[in-house]
Amino acid sequence: MSKVAMASVVLSAMLVLPVSNGFAGDVTKGKGLFEKNCASCHGAGGKGDGVAAASLNPKPRDLTDKTYMAGLKDEHIINTIKKGGAAVGKSPLMPPFGAALKDPDIQDVVAFLRSLEK
């Protein structure tokens, strides 16, 4: 196998992160979904500084906070995205995305969020 082909395989493996339910999420796909559905509040980099954040109380969570994110199980993040903030004891301003995003899409978003912790 050529060095270029090997590098491609390694890079692809690095972009797919496992989540707790045994499925894998794709960081690249998750980033695109996050930018489309979440960035207006959480900001493109996940810092809670999106354009809509200024008008929200409470402010969106900084998803790059390693200590906070390390304390969350993937299933909790999945439920927050799928069911909305109120369903998991968080802000009712966080809408549910379960009707708009399929489970694999949500897993991709979780993989992207986990990549922000590094």
Image (cartoon, grey):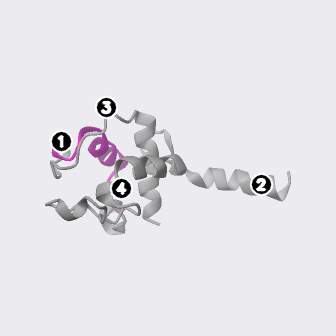
- Numbered disc 3: secondary structure: loop
Checking the image for residue 6, the label placed there is: 2
**Residue that label 1 marks:** 87
Residue 62, picture quadrant: bottom left
Label pair 3/4, CB-CB below 8 angstroms = no
Three-letter code, disc 1: Ala
Q: Main secondary structure of the magenta part?
A: helix
Q: Amino acid at mark 3?
A: Ala
Q: Would you say residue 73 sits in the magenta stretch?
A: yes
The residue that mark 4 highlights is 39
At x 44% / y 39%, what residue is drawn? 105
Cα–Cα gap, marks 3 and 4: 18 Å
Q: What stretch of residues is rendered in magenta?
A: 70-86
The percent coordinates of residue 63 (x first, y second) are: 34, 61
Q: Are marks 2 and 4 in contact (CB under 8 Å)?
A: no
Distance Cα–Cα, label 2 vs label 4: 33 Å
The percent coordinates of residue 77 (x first, y second) are: 32, 48
CA gap, disc 1 to disc 3? 15 Å
Q: Is residue 21 visible?
A: no
The earlier-in-sequence mark between 4 and 1 is 4
- Which circle, 3 or 2, is nearer the viewer? 3
The answer to whether marks 4 and 1 mark residues whose Cβ atoms lie closer than 8 Å is: no
Location of residue 46 (image quadrant): bottom left
Distance from Cα at disc 2 to Cα at disc 1: 44 Å
